[in-house]
Image: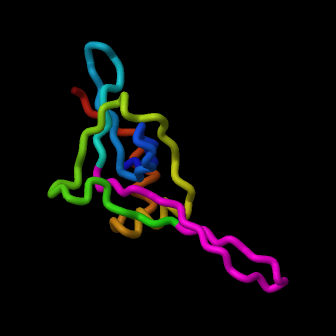
Amino acid sequence: MTVKVILLKSGEDVISDAKEILDEEQKGIVAYYLSNPYIMQLTSRVEDGEDEQPRTKFSVQYTHWAPLSKQRQFVIPADWVVTIYDPHDSIMKDYCDKHNITSEEESDAGSETAAA
């Protein structure tokens, strides 16, 4: 299992178990296989601070990516991906807790690929 955040051309930040799909002939990545993807949205609210200074509190809201779909696994063409990055530790913990993934599963799996 490799949990990553994928920024799509649509502007969505999607967290998912992500695997590369390789084209053996051209020796490149042609797509990504996503399992249990969620859109992440950063929200903020201003609260009164103890020293009369307002403080901004941030939180992350998760929404199923493609919420009307019966399936929870998707193939995304590589040209729809802007960038891929590792989630912050607290985001990783939230995602793993939601899917009953232990931290050992995440760290032991490394990078997994599938051939096209």
Front residue of this view, candidates 56 and 104 = 56
Q: Residue furthest left?
A: 70
Front residue of this view, candidates 21 and 42 = 42
Picture residue at 76% right of the left edge, 82% below the top: 49
What colour scheme has been applied to the protein in the rendered image? rainbow
Query: Count the marks: how many?
Result: 0
Quadrant placement of the C terminus: top left
Q: Residue furthest top?
A: 25
Q: Residue furthest right?
A: 51
Asked if residue 113 can be seen in this view, the reply is no
Name the chief secondary structure element in magenta: strand
Picture residue at 84% right of the left edge, 83% below the top: 51
Expressed as whole percent of the image width and height from the top left, the position of residue 14 reads 41, 50
Q: Is residue 41 magenta?
A: yes
Picture residue at 31% right of the left edge, 26% below the top: 30
Above or below 105: residue 48: below
Expressed as whole percent of the image width and height from the top left, the position of residue 57 reads 64, 72
Query: Is residue 34 shown left or right of residue 81?
Result: left
Expressed as whole percent of the image width and height from the top left, the position of residue 45 reads 61, 73
Asked if residue 90 can be seen in this view, the reply is yes
Above or below 115: residue 86: below
Front residue of this view, candidates 42 and 46 = 46
Q: Is residue 2 magenta?
A: no
Above or below 71: residue 56: below
Query: Is residue 53 shown left or right of residue 107?
Result: right
Expressed as whole percent of the image width and height from the top left, the position of residue 32 reads 32, 37
Q: Quadrant of residue 89?
A: bottom right
Give the residues in magenta.
Answer: 35-59
